[in-house]
Amino acid sequence: MAGHYVIAGKAVPNHLIAIGFLSAYAAVGGYFALKPKAPQPATPPIKASSADEENFIKEFLKAAEEKQ
């Protein structure tokens, strides 16, 4: 039979150690893959050079949405 390691006084077969490491690796990968993401803003930020320009852009977008 294949080898084994003695862990805490018990003989643990190599294949069980390998299964344990692969399972732990898959569990950690699944955790990070399924972790909730931070919510993204609905619209991109407005990069205006002044407050007047920003207000104009907001009003323009508001008017364009009302037309639709």
Image: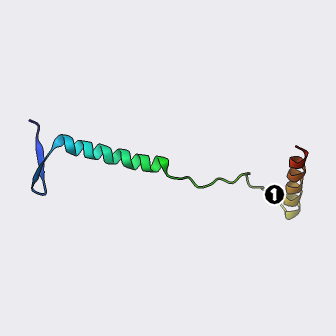
User: How many numbered discs?
Assistant: 1
Q: Position of residue 30 (x, y in %)?
A: 42, 46
Q: Is residue 15 toward the left or the right of residue 3 in the image?
A: right
What residue sits 86% from the left and 51% below the top? 61
Quarter of the image for the C terminus: give it. Answer: top right
Direction bottom: furthest residue: 51
Q: Identify the secondary structure beneath mark 1.
A: loop
Residue 55: image quadrant is: bottom right
| Mark 1 crowd level (few <14, some 14–19, many ≥20, 10 Å Cα) | few
The disc labelled 1 sits on which kind of residue? Ala
Which residue in the protein does label 1 denote? 48
Identify which residue, 53 or 30, lies in the foreground: 30
Q: Is residue 28 above or below residue 3?
A: below
Quarter of the image for the N terminus: give it. Answer: top left
Q: Position of residue 49 (x, y in %)?
A: 82, 59
Q: Is residue 51 toward the left or the right of residue 5 in the image?
A: right
